Structure formats: structure tokens, C-alpha cells
Image (spheres, grey):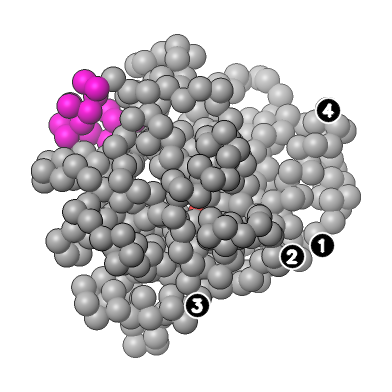
Amino acid sequence: MPEVVPTLDPLFFRQLPALSLPEIGLAVVTPWVGDEIPKKDLKRLLEDAFDFPIPLKFLEAGTGVLELFHGPSFAFKDVGARFMSRVMGYFIQSGSRELDILVATSGDTGGAVALGFLDVPGIRVTILYPEGKVSPVQEWQLTGHGKNIRAIAIKGDFDDCQSLVKNAFRDPELQHELRLTSANSINISRLLPQSLYYFWAYAQLMTQGIREVAFTVPSGNFGNIGAGLLAERMGLPVQALVAATNANDTVPRFLRGSEWEVRTTEPTLSNAMDVSNPSNWIRIMELFGRDSKRVRSHLTAYSYSDEETRNGINLLMEMHGYLACPHTAIGWLAAKEHQQKRPGTYASVFLSTAHPCKFPEVYPESWQRKIPEPATIQGWQNKPTWVRTMDSDFTALKDYLLS
Ligand SMILES: *Cc1c(COP(=O)(O)O)cnc(C)c1O
């Protein structure tokens, strides 16, 4: 957790509509890294990381979708993973000890991290994912690489994977034997770059004369919305930040006034949000001085069942001809519910977190043939994979990492 959140110069906001994505990145990231990365290197790094578009599309007046899925793994995780991998690649010195990156994934993080680090010398990645709980395309994106990318299917759920990773960081022997680091959103270098697309969306709105915006964020581990809160603290004028979850609704229940109560994680259609103990929540509480009352008055959250998610997917298609992944559909449902409950003159922007091609099995059969399949994943069913299966047992993981 950063000790202080820097604020941006008002001049930056006046220039904002004219800036490109990497230029916004440079302005937003520079106050965090200080002079640890010289400006010209940081600029190159950002241009390399953000070489894909992040379009804001309006479905109707006042409601827009920010598409974050045009990177190589087709999920918004590319934003954080590509920046992080390039920063680590920048700092790793040739000849120094190999860096071991451990990552737990509910589906999308692993794919983005694997692509970000594939073939990077001096770095080895170990991905833990819940066996049978990721979509087939997601699984292929985790297991289809080999080389410096190792995939482990854990007999458990995502929270089990996440706690195995956290245990590894606490283990003195592993700490001593390996140079371990995390690629999950517990790593701050994933969150910082994510805040830049909130500024980017705002820049697009400014060009249309819009100054008030509510962002709705499909949430699981609460990194994405955490990045939005950081953007707000840095000075971005945000009317509201709204979290949208599936049945794993620890946060919505808490914000409605209940105790913080973590229940068993329930598998849903929006599997990348099947998280019941979100690891970024502690950061969000910290941003509000650990004061539940302040968090509750600042953040709003809504949750949706699988049936509501399917309805959302169908309605988006019927009303707007828009094909959304299940996570994105939940974002839209929450945007609509918020507009109804807190009407106002603000524009509503919901974040689209993944491309629908990653979740073909959730759509009616008649749609499946029409889902556009990007060239890089075509034919994946026939390609080789590398994976091992493991019980949710820390000793087994530790032995494997040390072997
Ligand atoms: C990771 C992910 C989410 C949840 O994001 P958090 O930052 O963990 O809250 C939502 N949708 C998709 C498609 C994801 O991959």
C-alpha cells in the first residue's frame, strides 16, 4: 500500500482530451515511480505495454462501455500484466538470480501474465488455477505455452489458490531459496497502470462536453475498482464508483451494513469474479482510514445471480445488438440499477473486462457460431498443453517449487 497518493496538476486535466493513452500513462505513473525509471525509458515502456486500443463506445445517450479487452489475452488483465512484466524485465539484471513469479488465477490473470512474461529471460512463472473452474479457452491460455511458464491445476477453488500463494510468500525457506514475487493484484505494479484508463475514459467524455461520470466495475478481487479509487484520489472527478459482483457478494453485503463475512466461494457464469475474500479489500479500507462508515458512504455495490446475468446478456443483445461476456453483462446491470436508484445528469460508463470469445459456452447455441474469434486463438483445441494437477496442499506446492 503506498504511503501517500500523489495528486495530479490541474494543468494535466486541462490537457487531458488531447493526450494519447501512453501520454496519459506517463503523467499518471510518473508521480509514483519518481526518478527510479528515467522518463524516456518509462515512455518507451508504456508505449510498448499499451499498443492496443481501449475504445469507449456509447450504447445509448448517457451509457457507454469502456472496452478493456483488446490486448493479447482478451481481458483487461493485459493492462496491468503488460506494464508489470515490462517493469520487471527493465529492472532484472542479466546474470542475477532467476526471478520466480507466483500467480493465482480465477481464469484471466494467468493468461495475461503468461503472455506478458513468455520467453522473458531470467523469469519463471508458476500459475495456480482451480481445476475445472476456468473456461476451456482460458485454460488453454494458461497451459498452452510451456517454456518458462508452468501451470498447476489445483483441486480447489480460487481462494485456495490465492492462499497457497500467500503462504508461499510467508514461508522463510522459500523466501531464502527462491527469489519470489507475485503477479497478482497484490502486486502494486498491476494496480497503478490500471488507473490510467479511468483518466482515458474521462478524456473521451470531456471531448463530448461531459464532466460527470459514474464508473461501474465488474469486481472479483477488487483490483480494478481499487485502481479507480486511486485515480479518484489522484484528482479524477468521479461522481460514483459502483462495484458489480456475481453471487459471491461479500462486499455488497458488507456495504449494505452487514458484518464482513466470507462464505464458501460459489462457481458462477462469471468465473473470473468467483472470489469471496477479495485481496484488495484491505487496500480499499486503508484508503478510507479503515473506517467502515466512510467506505459505505463512498462506494456502492450490486450483485447478480447467474439467471440475472443471462437475462442481462440477452437484453444487451436485444436492445443494443451488443455481445457482452458475463462479467461485462453484470457491469451493465449494475450501471442500469444505479441509474434507477440514483438518477442524475451523470454519464454512466461500465467497464467491459473480457472478450466474449473466452466464454462461448455461456451463450445460446445459435449465437456461438457468430462470436468473432480472434486469429491468435483459432485452432487452440488442437494445440499441445503443459499442466500438472495438485491437491490444495501447501507442502506439495513447496516441494514442487524447491524441486
Ligand atoms: C479479473 C476479472 C474481473 C475482476 O477484476 P478484479 O480486479 O479482480 O476485481 C472481472 N472480469 C474479468 C473478465 C476478469 O478477468
Query: Mark 2 or 3 closer to N-term?
Result: 2
Question: The N terminus appears in which quarter of the rendering?
Answer: top right
Q: Regarding mark 3 in the picture, which secondary structure is present there?
A: helix
Query: Which corner quadrant of the image does residue 340 belong to?
Result: bottom left
Q: Regarding mark 2 in the picture, which secondary structure is present there?
A: loop
3D distance between C-alphas at marks 2 and 3: 21 Å
Residue 168 placement (x, y as % from top left): 78, 41
Q: Which mark is residue 391?
A: 1
Q: Regarding mark 4 in the picture, which secondary structure is present there?
A: helix
Q: Which mark is residue 226?
A: none
Identity, as a three-letter code, of the amino acid under mark 2: Gly
Using a 10 Å C-alpha cutoff, classify the residue at mark 1 as few (fewer than 14 neighbours), some (14 to 19) or many (20 or more): some
Q: Which residues are magenta?
A: 10-25
Q: Which residue is mark 2?
A: 156
3D distance between C-alphas at marks 4 and 2: 28 Å
3D distance between C-alphas at marks 4 and 1: 24 Å
Residue 171 placement (x, y as % from top left): 84, 37
3D distance between C-alphas at marks 3 and 4: 44 Å
Using a 10 Å C-alpha cutoff, classify the residue at mark 3 as few (fewer than 14 neighbours), some (14 to 19) or many (20 or more): some
Residue at image position (60%, 38%) is 290
Asked whether the beta carbons under mark 4 and mark 2 sit within 8 Å of each other, the answer is no
Q: Is residue 166 visible?
A: yes
Residue 338 placement (x, y as % from top left): 34, 62
Query: Mark 4 or 2 closer to N-term?
Result: 2
